[in-house]
Image: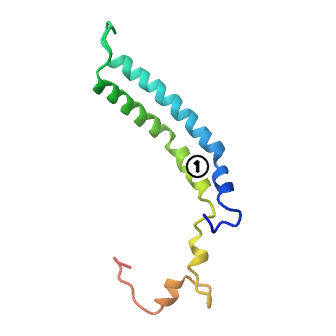
Amino acid sequence: LARSPTGPWPALYRSLPTTLAMNVPYNMVSVAANEFFKDRLSSPDRAKALPVWKLLLSGGLAGAIASFATTPLDVIKTRLQTQGLFDHRKHLTSPARGRPAAASANRGRRRHPLTG
């Protein structure tokens, strides 16, 4: 993060709207699904508390559904946060010819088709 010319903070806050747009739906889906599964797993009279294994099952299923629904937003958020921080082409070029350093060092050598 120290290589960024403006420091790490703008990169982290650039994705704040996406983070909020991901966390709010995640929690809404998670809570609604958890309540749905707890309702389905409870006994008809609902007089007794649910056993721990049913609570864990309900929470696990709800979390899986919420994660599945919001993963694309998480990918967008991560790409926004790391945008411009890992430009490998800039650091791997040969100063003499502007080529990637590995390509100029291995010029003229045959590469194995499977291992490169």
Q: Is residue 55 above or below residue 43?
A: below
Q: Quadrant of the C terminus?
A: bottom left
Residue found 57% across the figure and 50% down from its top: 76
95 left or right of 102 in image? right
Q: Which percent across, then down, holds residue 107?
A: 48, 91
Viewer-closest of 7 and 58: 7
| Residue nearer the viewer, 91 or 53 | 53
In the displayed structure, 102 sits above or below 22; it is below
Residue 59 percent location from the top left of the image? 38, 30
Q: Picture coordinates of residue 113 (x, y %)?
A: 36, 79
Q: Left of 56 or right of it: where is 63? A: right
Q: Residue furthest right?
A: 6
Q: Quadrant of the N terminus?
A: bottom right
Q: Amino acid at mark 1?
A: Lys
Q: Dot 1, crowdedness within 10 Å: few (<14), some or many (≥20)?
A: many
Q: Write down the quadrant of residue 18 in the picture.
A: top right
**Measured along the vertical axis of the image, is residue 71 above or below residue 28?**
below
Choose top left, top right, bottom left or bottom right for residue 109. Answer: bottom left
Residue 54 to residue 21: above or below:
above
Where, by quadrant of the figure, is residue 52 drawn?
top left
What residue is disc 1 on? 77
